[in-house]
Every structure is written in C-alpha cells, then in structure tokens.
Amino acid sequence: MNAPRTTNPIEQESAAPVLSNRHFIGKVVEAEEVAPEIWIHGYRLPEVARHAQPGQFVHLRLNDGTAPLLRRPFSILDVYPGEGVARILFKVVGTGTRILAGKRPGETVDVLAPLGTSFRVPENVRRLVLVAGGIGMVPLYFLSRELSAARPGIEIDYWFGARSGQEVYLLEDLRQWCRRVEAVTEDGSAGHKGRVPDHASEWRDADMIAACGPIAMLRAVQDVTADWPVPVHAALESFMGCGLGACLGCVLDTVDGFERVCTEGPVFDLRRLRLEVST
Amino acid sequence: MSAPATGTKVDMRVQLGPLELKNPVTTASGTFGYGTEYRQLYDPTHLGGVFLKALTMAPRPGNKPWRIYETPSGMLNSIGLQNVGIEEFFAKKEPFCRELAAKGTAVFANLAAQTVEEFQQLVERLEETDCIAAYELNVSCPNVKRGGCQFGTDPALLRELVSSVRPGTKRPLIVKLAPQVTDIAAMARVSVEAGADIISLINTFPAMAIDAEKRRPILATVTGGLSGPAVKPIALRMVHAVRQAVDVPIVGMGGIMTWKDAAEFLLAGASAVAVGTANFVHPPSPLEILAGLEEYCRRHGFARVSELTGALELP
Ligand SMILES: Cc1cc2nc3c(=O)[nH]c(=O)nc-3n(C[C@H](O)[C@H](O)[C@H](O)COP(=O)(O)OP(=O)(O)OC[C@H]3O[C@@H](n4cnc5c(N)ncnc54)[C@H](O)[C@@H]3O)c2cc1C
Ligand SMILES: Cc1cc2nc3c(=O)[nH]c(=O)nc-3n(C[C@H](O)[C@H](O)[C@H](O)COP(=O)(O)O)c2cc1C
Ligand code: FES
C-alpha cells in the first residue's frame, strides 16, 4: 500500500505534528482568560505563524470523539513568526468553546490553517478605520497590528463596540499601534454609550473601512457607507463544515450569488453582500 | 483463506461489478467537491475512487443559508444540490477527473435530476468523456413531474428511472438508495431488476433541528439530511439487508470515521466504502482508513481485502 502514513487522533495518542501543509498538531503554549469567558490561546504552529494573514482563520478539532463532531473556526488574533506561535481569542458560547477553554499549556490542538481570504489594503490607504463588534475585534486586531508595523505613518482608528465594558479588552495593546482607539458600549459602562455605527460621521476622512462583527452591525455599516467612495471590507461568519471549500455548507448570499465564507471569504467586499438580519 | 506472513502485502484491490478499484476506500458525493478541494491536504489519487458532487444539467444556486448544523454525533445539511452544472463541469472540473482516472482512481459521477429525461441527458453528455467510471443515480431527488415524490421512495418511479437510463450507457449504473423507506431490500431489488449494476447506500436521512429560544427551525429549508456517526448503526443494518436481497456489489456508507467502521461495512456485505462527513472532521481519514484496513487484514490473516466482504459470521 503506497498511501502516506498519517496518524488519526481517534486511533492513536501520538499524533505527528505536521499532517500536511495545512493540517497541524500544535502545542498550547499560552492559555489566558483575558475577560470573563474570553480566552486567548497561543499555539506552537510555525508554518501558520509564518504564513497567516489578517482575516484568515484556523479550523480546530476540539476532541477525539464524535461529540462535538465538526471543527470550529476561529480568526487568527496575531502571529509570532520568531517563536512559531499563532494566537486566537475566543468567547465561550457553547459545547465546543467550553472544551477549548479547558485546554492547558502542554496539551495539543488539531488545526487546519491558515484558511480563507485576508484583508487587502491598497497601498494608497493613509487612513484606515476599523469597526469591530464584540468578538469581531479579533481579525481587526491582527490587521491593525500587522499594518502599523508594515506601513509606518498609516493612521488607524479602531472602533470597538460591545454590550458592556466587560466585553471590551486589549485596548492597551491597540493603543500601541492605533492612532485612536474608541470603545462604544450599549450600556455605557465603558467609552461612549450607544452603538459603533452611531459614530460613522467620524469615519468620513477614511481611505478604507474594514469591519467585523454581528450581522446587524455590518448591515448598519453597509447602510451608512453605501455611497462613500472608499473600499469597505468585512470579515464574515457562518456555520462551517469542511472549511476547505468542499461541502458548500458555509455560503452567504452576494450580488453574484452564494459564495463560500471559508474560501471566497471570510473577507468580502461588504457592498457585495446581501445580509439578512435574523432574530 | 491463506494467512499472509507479517509484512506481506495485502491485496487491496476490489471488484465492483466490471470495475476494479485499486482499494475499497472512496469519498462520498457532496463531501469531497470535485476532488480538487482536498488536494491542498493530500494526493487524492491514493483513493480507490471519488464520488463527485451531484451534477445537474443547468447550474444550481442551491438553498439559502443556514445550510448546515451540528446534531449529536452527526450533522444536518441542506445544500440543495448547488453545483456548477454540466457545461462548467466540462470546462473546469473534468481535467482533474482525467488526472484521477489516469492514476487509477475511479471517478464516479453523481447525477441529480428532477425528471427521468434530465437523468438521461446527463448520462448522454457524460458519455463524451472517458474519465467517468460509472454513474451514481442520486434518487433522493424530488420528481417534479410526479408532485415532488422522490424517485428513491417509490418503487414504481425507481424502476422507471433505472430502466430508462439503462439503455443510454454501457458503463455501470449505481443506484444510491435513500434510507427513508419501509423496506430498503425491496428498493435494492427493484433497482437491480431494472438494470442497476451496483447499489450504494445510504444517502442522508431527512431530519430537522429546532431553535427553541427563537421558536424557529435552524435550517432555512426547515429540514435537511442527517449524516455522520449518528446514522452508522442504521446504515450497517441496511447494507446487511441489501446484501441478503441482491447479488450485485455494494458501496457502503453512513458515519464511517475509522478503519473499524469501514471493516464493519465490508463485513456486513459492502465491497467498497465511501467516507463522507469524516472528511470534514479529519481530512486524512480516508487514507488512515485504508492503512487501517490493510493492517486489519494482516492481523486477521486475510490475503485480500475483498475476502472481508460479507464475511460476517451470523449466529
Ligand atoms: C471565519 C470565522 C471566524 C470566527 N472567529 C471567531 C473568533 O475569533 N472568536 C470567537 O470566539 N468566535 C469566532 N467564530 C465563531 C465560532 O466559530 C463559534 O463561536 C464556535 O464555533 C461556537 O462553537 P461551540 O461549540 O462553542 O458552540 P455551539 O455549542 O455549536 O453553539 C452555541 C451557540 O453559538 C452559536 N454559534 C455556533 N457557531 C456559530 C458561528 N459560526 N457563527 C455564529 N454563531 C454560532 C449557535 O447558534 C449557538 O447558539 C468565528 C466563526 C467563523 C465562521
Ligand atoms: C454536505 C453534504 C453534501 C452531500 N451532497 C450529496 C450529493 O450531492 N449527492 C449525494 O448523492 N449525496 C450527498 N450527500 C450524502 C453523502 O454522500 C453520504 O451518502 C451521507 O453523508 C452518508 O455518509 P456519511 O455519514 O459518511 O457522511 C451529502 C452529504 C453531506 C454531508
Ligand atoms: S465550510 Fe465547507 S465549503 Fe465552506
């Protein structure tokens, strides 16, 4: 038999660290609860740390059994190519994220990464406005960090919306590389009271807008920026199966028909999306 | 049964009617795209066969999202047969299918249609390429001319479909049975009488998930198809029942995650297996299943994997 030998964690304890150029077993090197039920995990994944771009995601297998069954997607928070570490930030919302939050340094995770598209910021962009809602702060954190390092002089405004002050975090980090960092909370317990799109008038001199957050927020951004002459891009979410473009389970509706969040996205031109607000 | 010495090669070839597969492990339709998607992870030419995503004559946009959802040890999908349509298949996807076929990996076209005529047209068009080893009729499609009744749940419709498609090709016809029937063996018998060379089973079960808080179904289409480990025991029972009912080879599937699951399907009577949902969970599963099956044969003294088929010892 000439099939390459790989190891299935279902069957065996000792998993090979590199299963292919997109499939890895990474060691947990950092696990910190940065706010209630919000965790940062750092994984030793040298290949991912070298190649991942802001907006891309990791598709994590959470256990070796069959419940939960499917992988769970998480945006990449940042990478440390020198240390070979990639980090994610996640909120505990259900079974899978609860299991993930229980992982401790030294344990391993099974990762497909880096997957999906990334934010493309044209060279002429001098002022970038980032609009984050809740956990949507993650890819924009990565984007602002990378861009400020790669393009000295670029001015980045980071608008971070959340329900309450408890759900606003990493502001000190962001202030290191963003010109302006503003928190907006629905209950007013941190920063401005209200919702991020209420502040759209302050984004008018941006050369580009990048957003990530709940559909309702993205719809509001879509509406206020509809006739602005600048690119407006956003990272989207969806339930995912394969994460690799094969199952067609993760599609969103666009002006050109259904497109896969895992392959044509997660970063889309926001104006191309037909977003439906449910609830 | 001849016991091979440790380290000897096990003959992994299996016969599916007139077709020889280099090994019994294939990937299930709709879970492996057109073969190209998984190339970023491994070389699909190691597989015995690849069942392509369902093809229809015209491109189909598929259903509105949400399309998938996780259920206990399983998943629901309502993709709605989204596919590029037959012309785009020839333009964009067929070249890689040729590559697979050239390396001895059988390519199976999964055909979906809403009328008997459309099934016939699909076969007619696909006869133009030599890279397709056999046609798999996805009979879990509603027949629009018969009030949406599924081909695969009405014996008379199923007979009409298979016997109408049969004269259009010399290639083997595979009928992929829908599990939501009272008597799966009867559907297999009807298929074989009408000209099917191979039976594959099972397709997904119609199923549903509800969000109690929102008092709404989760999937945009309300219902979807259940797959994954949750369906495995039912699928095994059905493969076993079909094995008793007909003499043609069987491709078994439904919740296969490991080589052990695959061995169970072979023992129940399948000649080959298809790996579906497991591709999403652990992409290298088909290769590991292949390696595991070989090891299993060696350990149990089978010189050929084909000896496992139906080797179940009944009480
Ligand atoms: C590209 C992408 C990037 C993501 N990045 C992050 C990130 O950086 N940090 C983070 O915390 N989360 C992120 N998510 C969401 C994350 O994948 C889900 O929170 C996670 O899958 C939930 O798993 P669970 O098993 O804990 O929840 P489950 O037990 O499966 O579900 C719990 C609840 O969460 C909802 N839910 C589950 N999955 C999703 C989803 N994909 N989108 C919306 N709602 C969902 C369910 O409807 C349910 O109400 C991202 C999702 C995508 C598609
Ligand atoms: C996302 C998804 C898409 C599928 N699409 C098709 C399809 O196009 N045609 C078909 O005959 N079966 C389709 N199936 C059914 C599978 O081929 C298989 O019969 C079923 O999933 C059971 O196997 P599993 O439990 O290993 O997944 C699909 C299954 C899934 C999960
Ligand atoms: S998750 Fe399978 S196609 Fe996107």
Image (spheres, coloured by chain):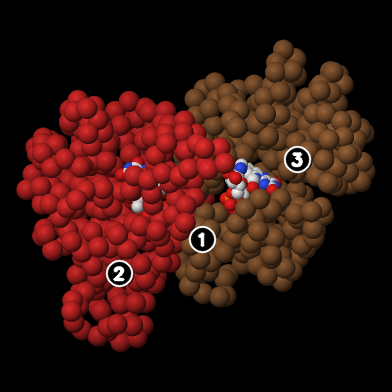
Chain colours: A brown, B red
What's the chain of the residue with tag 3? Answer: A
Q: Residue at x 69, y 40 (%)?
A: A55
Q: Is residue B74 left or right of residue A51?
A: left
Label 1 to label 3, Cα distance in Å?
Answer: 27 Å
- Where is B315 relative to A51, above or below? below
Is the same chain shared between marks 3 and 2?
no
Residue A134 is marked as 3
Residue situated in front as seen by the camera: B71 or A244: B71
Residue B183 placement (x, y as % from top left):
17, 52
Within-10-Å neighbours for mark 1: few <14, some 14–19, many 20+: some
Verify CB contact (< 8 Å) between mark 3 and mark 2.
no
Residue situated in front as seen by the camera: B11 or A76: A76
Which numbered disc, 1 or 3, marks the residue that appears first in the sequence? Answer: 1
SS of the residue under disc 1: loop
SS of the residue under disc 2: helix
Q: Residue at x 60, y 56 (%)?
A: A95
